Image: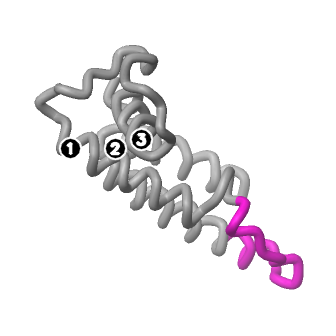
């Protein structure tokens, strides 16, 4: 529910969605300041990274396989640290699987 509430705060504050149409979102909740902070971080992340990393597309074809993997690892690690600032507990649970699958692929 914490992710949904943060998304609800983002949708209401930044996308202009009416509060009454956002399911399970209560604008008068005690966590309102925390949700606004999370919504700002979500917006900042989306504006910098773009949709599915669109703003981050670069050509690394000239690098060796391991160098490309390292660049990819560094990018994922920085994303995970930024996600940690928004959703700390979920980031910890998610990071183990991401690191494991990345090491397996390498």
**Residue 65 appears at what percent x and percent y?**
80, 73
Give the residue at x 17% y 26%: 29
Circle 2 residue = 87
Specify the color scheme: one colour
Mark 3 or 2 closer to N-term?
3
Q: Read off the magenta span.
A: 54-69
Residue wearing tag 1: 34
Numbered label attached to residue 10: 3
Determine the residue located farthest toward the bottom in the rendered image.
Answer: 62
Question: How many numbered discs?
Answer: 3
Which of the 4 image quadrants contains residue 91? top left
Q: Is residue 31 left or right of residue 25?
A: left
Confirm or deny contact between disc 1 and disc 3 (CB under 8 A): no
Of tags 3 and 2, the one toward the viewer is 3
Residue appearing at x 72%, y 52% in the figure: 105
Q: Is residue 50 magenta?
A: no
């Amino acid at each position: 529910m914490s992710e949904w509430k943060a998304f609800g705060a983002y949708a209401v504050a930044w996308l202009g969605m009416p509060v009454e149409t956002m399911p399970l979102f209560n604008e008068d909740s005690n966590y309102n300041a925390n949700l606004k902070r999370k919504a700002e971080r979500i917006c900042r992340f989306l504006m910098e990274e773009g949709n599915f990393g669109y703003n981050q597309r670069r050509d690394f074809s000239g690098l060796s396989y391991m160098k490309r993997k390292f660049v990819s690892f560094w990018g994922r690690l920085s994303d995970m640290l930024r996600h940690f600032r928004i959703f700390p507990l979920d980031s910890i649970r998610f990071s183990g699987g991401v690191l494991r699958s990345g090491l397996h692929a390498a």
